Amino acid sequence: MRQRIPVLREPGAERSRVGEVELFYDLVFVFAITQLSHGLLEQLTPLGALRTGLLFLGVWWMWIYTAWTTNWLNPDSTPVRQLLFVMMLLGLAMSSALPLAFAGKGLLFALAYVAQHALRTLYVVRAFGPRTPLGRNFLRILVWLAASGACWILGGLSDPLPRMGWWVAALAIEFLGPVSLFRVPGLGASSTSDWKVDPHHMAERCGLFVIIALGESLLVTGATFAGLPWNGPQALAFLTAFLGSVAMWWVYFDTGAERATRHFEHAEDRGKVARLAYTYLHIPIIAGIVLCAVADELVLAHPDHATGAGVAAILGGPFVYLLGNALFKWATNPRPLPPFSHMAGLALLGALAPFAFRHAFSALTLGMLTTGVMILVAVWEWLSLHRRPEPAH
């Protein structure tokens, strides 16, 4: 008879392993990221950017809450797999509704979103028991998510303009929850020291989401290039987009992700590191990649000229991505300031802005310049870190 696999992860080396079912679950978010980037391309306006940003934050909160949950739940357990499969179905419905979330499918998006949060949180309360520290923590989370869920559903039932207000309120509740330690009258507040996070699992899960976003960027580049004539400007735009993706991978993964994991492992309060560095500071990292994917498609399709919104995407993607990485590395390394290479890259991108918005460059030239800045930052940091020893912990 096969031995029953426990629902909760057991302490030890194997605890940090990311299960295949977690990777399978992530495929839903490949679709979600694709929907978001295509939606922004179709509505490249301030209102479109605001709507896409709101939906992006909702998708991120859904994924990161699940990543926290599977830090404790055992993905080899059949009940946990069943939970993730049901969430995948709901996530697929949620993702399919994204393009029309501010039109006719707002309620579908809201119901699928709220159902995932409720199902996952109730399952964890039952798995831990409401009297344990983590069980009580998830009881508090359930109260906060009930409040945000009401806003999501009321928004789904509303017209597009008030829907925006309801959904901003919902995201504000979800954003403030971890900061306020999910304080609830009668239940008190959580403590980050009670969040017994496995650093290797959490770091790997967030790194995999970065890969998802980068993979979507490559898919957009390849699919767009396949439908275009293979002339000089398009070929150069294709190469520029590819090199930009490689530079983004290098900036995050070459040393930053590994050094952050080591800091995470040796931190006195791992819950606090997980909350700041991996829950909040990964938001601009992923958002920057999505913006870069939009910019790459714009440059490929129209290398000669970019509108003001296009210029904002071409400059904004690398800027937001570098800013997110700078803050992430600052929060996970013992240094007084963010990496100087990243600050220099941000300054260079800022210096390009006045010329870019006066259309001094073609879209292709601007794309090449921003990719050059990303490559400069990657090479600068690589040379800097390989010339000096690692700080001792």
Image (cartoon, grey):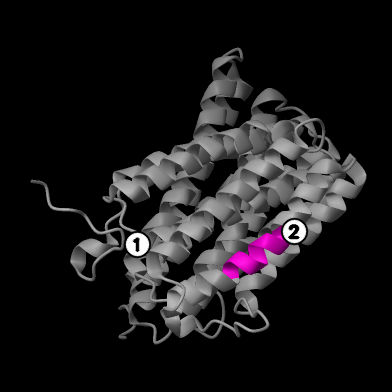
Tell which of 146 and 209 is nearer to you.
146
**In this figure, which residue is indicated by the disc labeled 2?**
170
Q: Secondary structure at mark 1?
A: helix
Asked if residue 308 lies left or right of residue 368, the reply is: right
Question: How far apart are the alpha carbons under marks 1 and 2?
Answer: 28 Å
| Magenta stretch, residue numbers | 141-148
Q: Position of residue 378 (x, y in %)?
A: 47, 57
Q: Residue at x 63, y 77 (%)?
A: 179
Q: Quadrant of residue 360?
A: top right
Tell which of 319 and 151 is nearer to you.
151
Which comes sooner in the sequence, label 1 or label 2?
2
Callout 2 environment at 10 Å: few (<14), some (14 to 19), or many (20+)? many
Q: Residue at x 27, y 57 (%)?
A: 17
Magenta stretch: residue 13 in it?
no
Q: Disc 2 marks which amino acid?
A: Ala
Magenta stretch: residue 145 in it?
yes
